[in-house]
């Protein structure tokens, strides 16, 4: 009642209105705080372990088939391993349609089989991507689009033979123009899966433990041009015969293969276990092998001609040969008749001795 009675006082009325508005604003602010969702940058995912001081989020061993959603915005290193993520879908790492600050992404041992186009969209600052120890069967040609700052890509023991051609197309993207290190160990590759080396800024190419038997002259020419590039090739079954000459002379004249001393011959059997660097030039020289082939062919032709000449001589002298054979037969017959005659005259020499 006192408030209404003092309403005639102008100053008190203004104070009352101001105080009422302030109370309403305060109540509205409290209601917004209570009803608004919790911010993802302050809460760690339930299936992960977060270390905000280092910017690391680690998600290990779970039944999830997709990349965890609502990744904290402060994440710089994201580790997802031991899960059953068979497919990396488009924009799998985008949180509410916004880009993340992730610079290191480790996705090994997740059973990944398919990488869809633009799967890494939303990671424009990614520097290192590890997809090792998966089972990639399908790799989109646009799988690595949107990674302009990627420096290191690890695909060790991850690419199945059916995806080898697709891998070559996926790695040809201009999005990987700043790639410094590419690891493809243990993938049974039979050749370098890069269509061109001049689109990259590669410093290290790891092709250890594959099925490479030789490297063609065209690829060797490209390697000569990339002076800064180091190529690791140990534990490959090299065929140390004609056709290995380009690789052999590259190893001799270049220092781009740091593990050159560990490159061993697998075939032929006589050279198995021999270091490629220890071979002689004639062991891999195609010209020498071709010369030997020509020599054997020429020898065969000469022997064939000699055989033909011999048969012609026999044919032209068939009459004399026939008479000669008849004479030999008659001589043998006469000799046999003399033998039989003597045998009949003295059939048993022991009886003759008794008679005496």
Image (cartoon, rainbow, N blue to C red):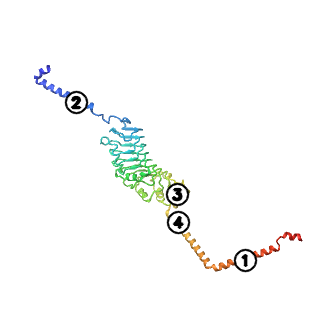
Q: Mark 2 points at which residue?
A: 28
Where is residue 184 shown, x and y percent of the image? 43, 49
Counting residues from the N terminus, which is met first, the one under dot 3 or under dot 2?
2
Q: Please, what secondary structure does the residue beneath circle 1 have?
A: helix
Residue under the point 20% across and 30% down: 25
Eye-nearest disc, 3 or 2: 2
Q: On the image, which quarter does residue 343 sit in? A: bottom right
- Quadrant where the image shows the C terminus: bottom right
Where is residue 15 shown, x and y percent of the image? 15, 25
Mark 4 packing: few (<14 Cα in 10 Å), some, or many (20+)? few
Q: Please, what secondary structure does the residue beneath circle 4 have?
A: helix
- 233 or 239, nearer to the observer: 239
Q: Please, what secondary structure does the residue beneath circle 3 have?
A: loop
Q: Name the residue under label 4.
A: 293
Residue under the point 11% across and 23% down: 7
Q: Which mark is residue 331?
A: 1
Counting residues from the N terminus, which is met first, the one under dot 4 or under dot 2?
2
């Amino acid at each position: 009642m006192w408030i209404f009675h003092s309403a005639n006082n102008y100053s008190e009325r203004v104070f009352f209105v101001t105080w009422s508005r302030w109370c309403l604003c305060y109540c509205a602010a409290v209601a917004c705080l209570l009803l608004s969702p919790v911010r993802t940058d302050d809460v760690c995912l339930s299936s992960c372990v977060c270390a905000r001081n280092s910017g690391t989020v680690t998600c290990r061993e779970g039944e999830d088939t997709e990349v965890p959603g609502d990744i904290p915005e402060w994440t710089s290193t994201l580790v997802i391993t031991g899960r059953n993520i068979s497919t990396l879908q488009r924009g799998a790492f985008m949180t509410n349609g916004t880009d993340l600050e992730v610079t290191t992404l480790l996705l090994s041992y997740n059973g990944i089989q398919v990488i869809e186009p633009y799967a890494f969209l939303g990671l424009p600052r990614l520097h290192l991507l590890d997809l090792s120890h998966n089972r990639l069967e399908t790799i989109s040609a646009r799988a690595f689009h949107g990674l302009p700052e990627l420096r290191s890509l690890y695909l060790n023991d991850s690419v199945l033979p059916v995806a080898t051609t697709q891998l070559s197309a996926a790695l040809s993207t201009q999005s990987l123009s700043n790639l410094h290190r590419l690891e493809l160990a243990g993938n049974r590759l039979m050749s370098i899966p890069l269509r061109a080396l001049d689109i990259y800024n590669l410093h290290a190419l790891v092709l250890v433990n594959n099925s490479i038997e030789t490297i063609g002259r065209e690829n060797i020419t490209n390697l000569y041009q990339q002076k800064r590039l180091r190529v690791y090739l140990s534990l490959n079954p090299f065929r140390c015969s004609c056709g290995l000459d380009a690789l052999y002379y590259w190893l001799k004249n270049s220092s781009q293969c740091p593990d050159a001393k560990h490159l061993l011959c697998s075939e032929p059997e006589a050279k198995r276990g021999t270091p490629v660097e220890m071979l002689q030039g004639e062991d891999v020289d195609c010209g020498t092998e071709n010369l030997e082939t020509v020599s054997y062919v020429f020898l065969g032709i000469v022997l064939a001609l000699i055989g033909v000449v011999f048969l012609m001589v026999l044919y032209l002298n068939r009459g004399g040969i026939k008479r000669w054979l008849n004479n030999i037969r008659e001589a043998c017959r006469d000799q046999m008749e003399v033998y039989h005659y003597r045998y009949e005259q003295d059939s048993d020499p022991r009886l003759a001795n008794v008679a005496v």
